[in-house]
Image (cartoon, coloured by chain):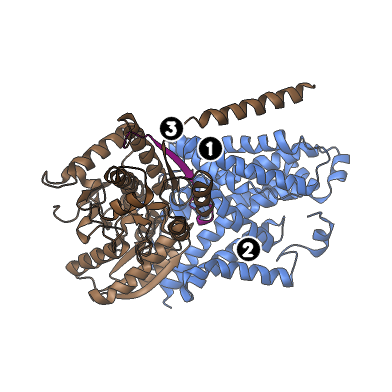
Amino acid sequence: MAFEQVLQYILSGVTNGSIYAIVAIGFNIVYNTTGIINFAQGEFLMLGGMTAISLSQFMPLPLAILFAVIITSLAGAMIDFVFIRRLRNPSVLMMIIVTIGLSIVIREMALHIWDEKVRSLPYFTGSEVTSISILGAYISPQVLWVLGVCGLMVLLLGLFFRYTATGRSMRACSSNKTAAGLCGINTGNMVTISFMLSAAMGALAGCVISPITQTQYDSGTSLAIKGFTVAILGGMGNSTGAVVGGLLIGMLESFSISVLPMAYKDAISLAILILILFIRPSGLFGSREESALKEF
Amino acid sequence: MSLKKVLALTLSISVCMAAAGCKKAPEDAIKIGAIFSVTGGGSNLGAPESKTAKMLVDEINAKGGVNGKMLDLIVKDSESSPEKAISFAKQLIEEEKVFAIIGPSTSGETMKIKSICDEAKVIMLSCAAAEVIVNPVAKYVFKTPQKDSHVAMRIFDTMKKMGINSIGIISDNTGFGNAGKDQLEKIAPQKGVKIVISEVYDKKATDLSGVLTKLKARNVQAVVNWSIVPAQSIVAKNMKQINLNVPLFQSHGFGNIKYAKEAGKAGEGIIFPCGRLLVAEQLPDTNKQKTLLVKYKKDYEAKFNEDVSTFGGHAYDAITILVEGLKKAGSADREKVRTAIENLKGFPGTAGVFNFSPQDHNGLGLDSLVILTVKDGKFVPYEKLD
């Protein structure tokens, strides 16, 4: 295989991989504070993309994206306020089923608000036909946007969890909810913030990928499945794991295309997942002791 | 009784009444079932089909119905899922006891219910393209869109004129994609075109740059994409992005301007065979279809405020053919209507002029297709129209 081709496959893998990673991190944020998997995570991407597309008719693109992120994160907060908080003695299973139900409700609502048509945001720089050459491989400038935004989000999130009081409180909740509560942390609010944060991240990712992948009322589902796979692969709750897992799956998929028919793409990534779960049930970066303590 | 119970009771009573209210269609109306992919992957097909069918049935009923009887259209949204299409078909046949079924929108769904309708002796007028729907012929199954084998032939003929000899094919994993891929692979050797590589992608694929890189490495002279899903626009964008600058051919599944709009500048120059509906105004006045094409296009665009697509036209044809069959038969007798449709000749529709026969339940010839291309975001004829 020529060098340019290898590079082309790498770039394609990194693009898809970083999208998977962002969805996986969204899963992780909520998982860390509540111990549940929010199956409506994919819908946040769709909501963000769709809202931005509608708003971009009336305002410049950056403003539309900003509002889309704000609106989606408010929707995330609503999910916690209206549903998760109201549950009395919620079991993990109960909360998970609530999120599955919500994902269906959000999808149906989107179908009624926007209809079934496929839409997309305009390219941030250049247009559909702009192509940049990197050492002989060609990519759309939008791919650089995806990589840049995903990288920046991972970085900022890392800093947020490490250096801010809110971030630390959220980590405390993840380690031990009761102890965090005893230290004066409002664990309920932390859950709300985690939903808002994951919704905002999802919305931003949904906007950046929209020019490439296009957005439709049900486009969140397949992303959520891939993101979930990646989150499990990297180890639930582990952001580094999500990034590594995402890039790994993205690369594997794109290189599998080069040697096998494309139809086997998903089979390859799922086979790898099963293999890893056999060898390391807690994921690549998850610790075995930690996962033993979790309910789910 | 507690307040909650009262509320629940009132609610259930009103639901019952609403349900009863819906069923006020006259007893002797002719019930027609329709299964369309209004949502899901085939929504760009099913949504215009459903709108068209409703519009047309309202129009027919306003004019006094058929043979003095009203038409009662029951539309089901299969969400582009063959499994749902099966259960809706059974429901329409067994519970609703419909006279005929219009649709489904996609080939995969149609193939799943082909034998169900045939065994139940219910006339089905499919709006899907694959040739396998009518080959082998099932007694009660008809279809209105052009055959995929004809589309493949027209694509190869155009390629030969352009001097293209080696191509790459990509298709989606729906029934339509698979059937089209088979036809392309079968007909290519006859036309002297070499298929260097043929790949299948998932119908929900959102990025095809990987598989296109593979095509690029094999130095193909043209790419043929055969699908109905939104990936039709993604293919065009991805090709430009990885700098694969060869002609892109699509199937007649591209006959919705939305796909071209989604592809934006990358959609320019896409070549595809299609019915004459999209270029209705540009047809010469001698064309047998022109009057009805222009009228349908005008009615649809005025009513729904969106561009007309060939898919809505397939539902239009299915209903007009059924109505013509009913008129010819003179009564709602299934066997008579079926025979009437089978012997329909020179009947103009949106997809072409239909000439049915016991061997041909599609009734459209190669001349029903014209080659179109995208220019300045619009569909224009690639060759001179006739």
Q: Which residues are magenta?
A: B67-84
For badge 2, the amino acid type reads Val
The quarter holding residue B184 reads: bottom left
Residue B219 point in image, percent of width and height: 32, 73
Comes first in the chain, label 3 or label 2: 3
Disc 1 to disc 3, C-alpha distance: 12 Å
Chain at tag 3 = A
Give above or below for B160 relative to A216.
Answer: below
State whether residue B122 appears in this view: yes
Q: Residue at x 60, y 61 (%)?
A: A246
Mark 3 residue element: loop
With respect to residue B260, does B207 lie above or below?
below
Classify residue A270 by image quadrant. bottom right
For badge 1, the amino acid type reads Ala
Residue A11: give x, y in percent of width and height.
48, 64
Residue on which disc 1 sits? A68
Q: Is the residue under label 2 in contact with that under label 1 (CB below 8 Å)?
A: no
Q: Colour of chain A?
A: blue
User: Callout 2: 10 Å neighbours few (<14), some, many (20+)?
Assistant: many
Q: SS at mark 2?
A: helix
Distance from disc 1 to disc 2, alpha carbons, whole Å, reads 28 Å
Q: Residue at x 78, y 43 (%)?
A: A169
Q: Chain of mark 1?
A: A
Q: Which mark is residue A244?
A: 2
Chain seen in brown: B
Considering depth in this image, is B127 or B202 the residue closer to the camera?
A: B127
- Whether residue A138 is visible here, answered yes or no, is no
Q: Chain of mark 2?
A: A
Residue that label 3 marks: A59
Task: Give coordinates of residue B357: x percent, y percent.
Answer: 26, 59
B82 inside magenta stretch = yes
Confirm or deny contact between disc 1 and disc 3 (CB under 8 A): no
